[in-house]
Image: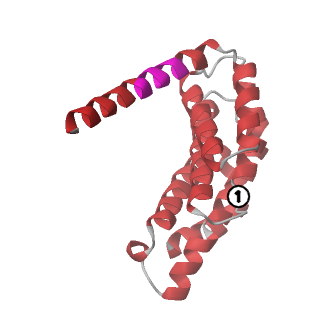
Amino acid sequence: MAQGNREDDDAWKSITAVANESREYLQSLLPAHIFLAAVTSLMKGGDVEVRARAVRLVVDRISTTDPASSEVSLFFDLMPDLVELLKDHENTESSTLVRQAALVAVEHIARVFSLWGKKDKHAHHFLSALGRSIDLLHQPCQKLHNDASTITTLDNVSRSMISSVALCSATLVRATGARCVATLPKLMKRLIIA
């Protein structure tokens, strides 16, 4: 019986590996505009897990996109949808996964594409994302302040959110430069509490 379970486990691992490899090939074959249209529809509706996986696909595609290509503008067009995912509608662990995936995608877009001088035209997207990121710090910082606790006593979800927001915010501050000066006091106050 144990031999059968191990064989089943091996079979499922092989199927998963083949499916992931096929997904990677398919993703690289699709033109960016078709890929992003499909992923955007997945991000806007459906199950929380599907939305989080769709955002992760965007992150994977960003890392393989040439920053000097014309496809970059399509990723900037996706920014309002990613910023929308950062809104704190519900505070469940699964919705936190979507927000963290969106933070990673925003950070990747800002880091990879802003280095190529394409940030000035899209700074408003980065500033909007920075504002939403700062708003995500409100609840964990409120917990810290009200309970007089430390970050080590927070739950894993809150600690992960603080870490993700800190990383994304650092990249967005670098990408926006002096344009973000008005938001820095609010960001720093919340990070210092954390």
Q: Residue, x 56% and y 52% (percent of image)? A: 97
Q: Position of residue 83 (x, y in %)?
A: 73, 49
- Going by the picture, which residue comes out furthest to the front? 1
Q: Secondary structure at mark 1?
A: helix
The residue located at (60%, 48%) in the rendering is: 103
Residue at 36% of width from left, 30% of height from top? Answer: 13
Identify the magenta region: 15-24
Name the outermost residue toward the top. Answer: 29
- What's the amino acid at mark 1? Arg
Between 58 and 18, the one lying in front of the other is: 18
Q: Position of residue 188 (x, y in %)?
A: 58, 67
Crowding near the residue tagged with mark 1, few <14, some 14–19, many ≥20 C-alpha atoms within 10 Å: many
Q: Is residue 17 magenta?
A: yes
Q: Is residue 101 left or right of residue 12?
A: right
Residue 55 in view (yes/no): yes
Say if 37 sits above or below 43 in the image: above
The residue tagged 1 is 132
Q: Nearer the viewer, residue 124 or 22?
A: 22
Q: Name the residue: 70% across, 36% down.
A: 119
